[in-house]
């Protein structure tokens, strides 16, 4: 079966963020980090770390600000968590940085525009790009953070303002902004951002108009986008699609669906070369949220064998 069940998170949650980064000291290698989220009753500052070899979750130092709907990205070995929504406060500009080598968090320059249900990606230039999201409206705002200068600059706006989108850095050096929502419309729109030129272009549309989906890049260079919500009742989806930036004319391909329908999930590519879908909202009345974790193991027509791949090096190559 292409999707396999992995050990669950410590509690049911939605609106979390996930990245793959260096293991916390004194461990070596890379780990998947599941950060923050919402239980339906409280915001979370929990940070759970998955060792794909040992097949276990552990916890590390909690994020200083409990929140959900934030963006997260890795630059120079550090994890940047930007924006989000905080109970009794609302939408925030908070920017906190986790240092695996010391298992500590620090404050960094706040994001200029408060928003949540945004997404973030690190480009080959080493800058962290915070894209889209919702504050007082759905934003087309793009802001770039320079970790060296600890400062933000405004970049060319995304043509289609939206929240609940997914972003990934493709192997072509472009940032892909996939689907999303701007009331009253769900979008199948896919747009690409060229950080070097500070320009946006259109890409083949996603097969479904959805929001709150997850996306990650496999070791084969394909973009995998999964789950999300659609329809008048925000029905959670289990569909999975892939896109090859090297053959844009081919558009998106259907892949094996996730075992559980989920929206507002997190996605990441693990150091084991598998694409992970974490937690999220089943949107089934009375069933709470997911604590479940699934991993996509690739089918023969995905064009990849994970045996012998050093996926940590592949991920580092994508961001320089």
Image (spheres, rainbow, N blue to C red):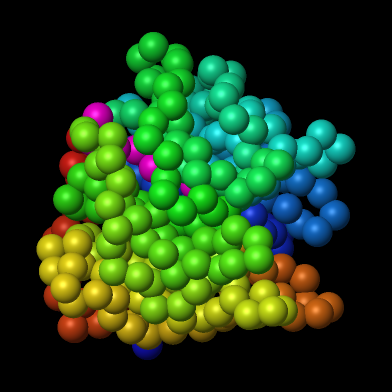
Which quarter of the rendering shows the N terminus?
A: bottom left
Residue lying at 63% horizontally and 80% vertically, measured from the top left: 231
Q: Nearer the viewer, residue 56 or 250?
A: 250
Residue lying at 43% horizontally and 26% vertically, measured from the top left: 154
Residue lying at 63% horizontally and 39% vertically, measured from the top left: 115
Q: Nearer the viewer, residue 256 or 254?
A: 254
Span highlighted in magenta in the image: 119-125
The percent position of residue 269, horizontal first and vertical second, equals: 36, 57
Question: Among all residues in the image, which is located at the extreme bottom?
Answer: 1
Say whether residue 162 is visible.
yes
The percent position of residue 274, horizontal first and vertical second, equals: 33, 65
Residue lying at 42% horizontally and 45% vertically, measured from the top left: 158
Q: Nearer the viewer, residue 187 or 311?
A: 187
Q: State left or right for residue 250 relative to residue 91.
A: left
Which quarter of the rendering shows the C terminus?
A: top left
Res 211 quadrant in image? bottom right
């Amino acid at each position: 079966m292409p999707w396999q069940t992995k050990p669950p998170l410590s509690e049911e949650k939605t609106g979390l963020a996930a990245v793959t980064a260096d293991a916390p000291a004194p461990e070596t290698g890379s780990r998947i980090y599941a950060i923050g989220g919402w239980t339906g009753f409280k915001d979370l500052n929990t940070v759970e770390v998955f060792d794909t070899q040992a097949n276990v979750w552990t916890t590390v130092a909690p994020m200083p600000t409990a929140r959900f709907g934030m963006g997260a990205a890795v630059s120079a070995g550090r994890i940047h968590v930007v924006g989000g929504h905080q109970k009794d406060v609302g939408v925030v500009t908070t920017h906190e940085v986790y240092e695996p080598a010391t298992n500590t968090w620090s404050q960094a320059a706040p994001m200029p525009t408060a928003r949540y249900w945004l997404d973030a990606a690190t480009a080959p230039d080493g800058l962290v790009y915070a894209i889209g999201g919702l504050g007082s409206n759905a934003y087309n705002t793009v802001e770039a953070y320079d970790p060296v200068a600890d400062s933000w600059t405004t970049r060319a706006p995304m043509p289609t303002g939206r929240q609940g989108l997914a972003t990934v850095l493709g192997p072509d050096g472009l940032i892909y902004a996939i689907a999303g929502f701007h009331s009253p419309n769900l979008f199948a729109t896919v747009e690409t951002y060229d950080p070097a030129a500070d320009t946006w272009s259109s890409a083949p549309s996603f097969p479904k108009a959805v929001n709150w989906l997850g996306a990650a890049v496999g070791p084969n260079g394909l973009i995998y986008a999964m789950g999300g919500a659609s329809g008048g009742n925000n029905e959670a989806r289990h569909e999975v699609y892939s896109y090859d930036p090297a053959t844009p004319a081919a558009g998106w391909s259907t892949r094996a669906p996730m075992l559980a329908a989920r929206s507002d999930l997190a996605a990441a590519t693990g150091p084991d070369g598998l694409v992970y879908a974490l937690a999220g909202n089943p949107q089934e009345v009375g069933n709470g949220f997911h604590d479940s974790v699934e991993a996509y193991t690739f089918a023969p027509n995905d064009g990849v064998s994970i045996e012998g791949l050093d996926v940590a090096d592949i991920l580092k190559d994508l961001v320089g």
